[in-house]
Image: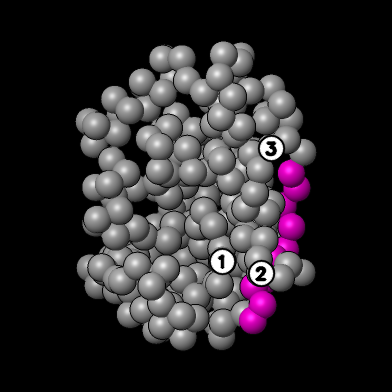
């Protein structure tokens, strides 16, 4: 936990390259240069759907395609220790959640859980940080929002080594319900639209697997909100 705080402070204080274009010696605003700020600000949440879509995938909305400044910013945040980007990316994710939810309504946000290995490698759970900032943004805009973590992630093989059937099978076994939290989460979900949060959607099998686990526990999923959708898949 302390390592994550120190990394975030370092990202905010020390000079760094632009997270969006990796340009050096540029004026930065929350980690990105003015051109990349403008590029990210121009993105508008859009409905997306992989082709083919896995069974059980909920309606999904993404901020944009996994390319350009959005892709580089996500990589800098997740893989290069730029934890200070959680705030601007979380605020962008809030816009996606609002679009996915439609009308202003009570929400329960459920971030897709990370494996213990990923949490250690990234000095914290990157989606939990995004969810925290997205929640703050939504509450400031008048949305009644709660966050829950009813699932835990189990170790699974590297998806790069698997074909589509193997990825789907691995995802279906990748999550377990936290039995001790189910009653509280069910109560929290009552009267709220449950929205899953993830950073990137590619095949959709992870979101479908999480949806299946939740719905088995009596927690219906309304939609999923992600920051990016890979461009090699179809969009709707």
Answer few, some or many: residues within 10 Å of disc 2's Cα (few below 14, many 20 plus, some between 14 and 19).
some
Residue 114 higher or lower than 119, as above or below: below
Q: Residue at x 42, y 44 (%)?
A: 78
Q: Are marks 2 and 1 in contact (CB under 8 Å)?
A: yes
Q: Which residue is mark 3?
A: 40
Left/right of residue 59 with respect to residue 152 in the rendered view: right
- Residue 59, label in figure: none
- Residue mark closest to the camera, 2 vs 3: 2
- Distance from disc 3 to disc 1, alpha carbons, whole Å, reads 20 Å
Give the mark, 2 or 1, whose residue is nearer the N terminus: 1
Q: Position of residue 8 (x, y in %)?
A: 37, 27
> Per the image, is 48 magenta?
yes
Answer few, some or many: residues within 10 Å of disc 1's Cα (few below 14, many 20 plus, some between 14 and 19).
some
User: Quarter of the image containing the N terminus?
Assistant: top left
Of residues 214 and 89, which is closer to you in this image? Answer: 89
**Is residue 214 visible to the viewer in this orientation of the structure?**
no
The local secondary structure at tag 1 comes to: loop
**Residue interval drawn in magenta:** 43-52
- Residue 202, label in figure: 1
Q: Which residue is mark 2?
A: 233
Q: Residue at x 74, y 44 (%)?
A: 43
Question: To which quarter of the image does residue 188 belong?
Answer: bottom left
- Distance from disc 2 to disc 1, alpha carbons, whole Å, reads 7 Å
């Amino acid at each position: 936990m302390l390592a994550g705080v120190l990394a975030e402070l370092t990202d905010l204080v020390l000079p760094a390259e632009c997270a969006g274009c990796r340009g050096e010696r540029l004026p930065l605003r929350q980690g990105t240069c003015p051109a990349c700020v403008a590029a990210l600000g121009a993105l508008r949440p859009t409905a997306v759907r992989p082709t083919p879509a896995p069974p059980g995938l909920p309606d999904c909305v993404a901020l944009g395609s996994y390319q350009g400044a959005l892709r580089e910013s996500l990589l800098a945040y997740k893989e290069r220790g730029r934890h200070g980007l959680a705030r601007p990316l979380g605020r962008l994710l809030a816009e996606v959640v609002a679009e996915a939810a439609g009308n202003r309504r009570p929400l329960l946000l459920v971030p897709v859980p990370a494996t213990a290995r990923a949490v250690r490698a990234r000095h914290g759970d990157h989606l939990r940080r995004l969810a925290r900032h997205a929640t703050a943004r939504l509450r400031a805009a008048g949305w009644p929002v709660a966050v829950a973590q009813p699932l835990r992630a189990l170790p699974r093989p590297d998806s790069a080594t698997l074909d589509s059937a193997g990825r789907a099978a691995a995802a279906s076994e990748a999550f377990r319900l936290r039995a001790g939290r189910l009653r509280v989460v069910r109560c929290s979900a009552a009267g709220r639209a449950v929205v899953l949060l993830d950073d990137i959607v590619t095949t959709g099998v992870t979101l479908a697997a999480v949806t299946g686990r939740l719905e088995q526990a009596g927690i219906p999923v309304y939609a999923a909100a992600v920051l990016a959708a890979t461009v090699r898949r179809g969009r709707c």
